[in-house]
Image (spheres, grey):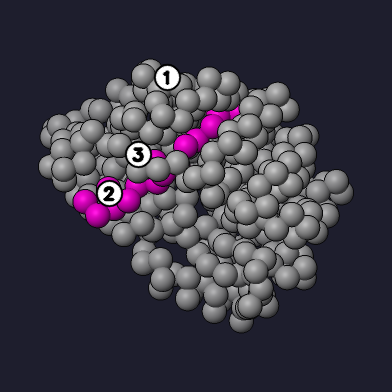
Amino acid sequence: MKSLKALNHTLANSKEAFDILQSPVYGREISFADHLEASGLFPLKPTQLEIFQINLGKMCNQVCKHCHVDAGPDRKEIMTRTTMAQCLRVIRSESSIHTVDLTGGAPEMNPEFRWIVEEIRSSRPDVKIIVRCNLTIILANPRFHDLPDFFKANRVEVVSSLPYFTASKTNAQRGDGVFEKSLEALKRLNDVGYGMEGSDLVLNLVYNPSGAFLPGDQNELELEFKKKLLDRYGIHFHGLFTITNIPISRFLEYLIRSENYEGYMEKLVGAYNPSAAAGVMCRNTLSIGWDGYLYDCDFNQMLEMKVEKSASQHISEWDAKSLLERSIQINNHCFGCTAGAGSSCGGATA
């Protein structure tokens, strides 16, 4: 058997991942396209371009078991200022874009991170800027210690993953000591006003299940997280997003290694929800890779499924009309976004 590192890379970046995703489950052929067609949604089309999600690079100070980006300290892919400038031209020219979502890896590790945040804020004061912060980056190095103040100065909305409100589950998924460091980072964000009741400094948390199962009810989990984190640690936050683990990259490797792949796919297919399918994030979101290539979503980006060829495929060739007229690229991993209450970078969708 290949080493886990080699297997991760293979499943994230080659045809093998497509073959696995399209393979029968318990001897039964499955097709996301067939489910969309039965729901009157095939081919899947964009509704509008409203959210511009930019991956600033795959470098990260953590190596999380569920990471669909396969991010880590050894990843060298990083967006250049030239590509960022091309993104900025689009953000300035497209008034329909109301949210710019900066992600990674740890987006803050890109040396041009502060530059692009300040450029977005100065040129589009009206736009919402989201940074997907892993929390521990704030403590990783003295040059990151002032991030809470930087976020506040630029009116950045912070979205952070916290797998659970206990150390054992969080550290098992994200690494030893991550829970304790995450709590300290959350306290620092609270200290400057993030997550506090009545504050417009928005702090939201993200919950991913730690195994081969779907997340519970988002509202119920949010109430539980708020009570536990406040009672035990005095921590405040605004909302909780539940996100289904998508069967790609490290999570796909885990499913195969633990012999849970077929069972998990059966759960996703069985929980297909037409309402969730109608509200999938790829219909109003565009994902920009670290190298400037365009994708229908962050998950397609990790499978190197660029937007269809009839549309502009690179930020340097931007053509809004062709992108709005394109058909969205799909595969069976898309069942993860349409199961149960649905899943997106902003939590449940149905």
Which callout, 3 or 1, points to the residue nearer the camera? 3
Report how far apart the C-alphas of labels 3 and 1 lie in the structure: 26 Å
Q: Is residue 314 magenta?
A: no
Residue located at (77% from left, 68% from top): 192
Using the image, tell me which numbered label, if any, was put on residue 278: 2
Residue 11 in the image: state x and y as whole percent.
43, 26
Q: Which residue bears the numbered disc 1?
A: 14
Q: Which residue bears the numbered disc 3?
A: 46
Question: Dot 3 lies on which element?
Answer: loop
Report how far apart the C-alphas of labels 2 and 3 lie in the structure: 10 Å
Report how far apart the C-alphas of labels 1 and 2 lie in the structure: 29 Å
Q: As displayed, is residue 37 above or below residue 207? A: above
Does residue 145 appear left or right of residue 131 in this picture? right
Q: Please state which of residues 3 and 50 is positioned toward the viewer in this rendering.
A: 50
Dot 2 and dot 3 residues touching (CB under 8 Å): no
Badge 2 or badge 3: first in the primary sequence: 3
Which residue sits furthest bottom? 231
| Image-quadrant location for residue 40 | top left
Using the image, tell me which numbered label, if any, was put on residue 339: none
Residue 81 in the image: state x and y as whole percent.
73, 28
Q: Is residue 285 magenta?
A: yes
Badge 3 or badge 1: first in the primary sequence: 1
Question: Dot 1 lies on which element?
Answer: loop
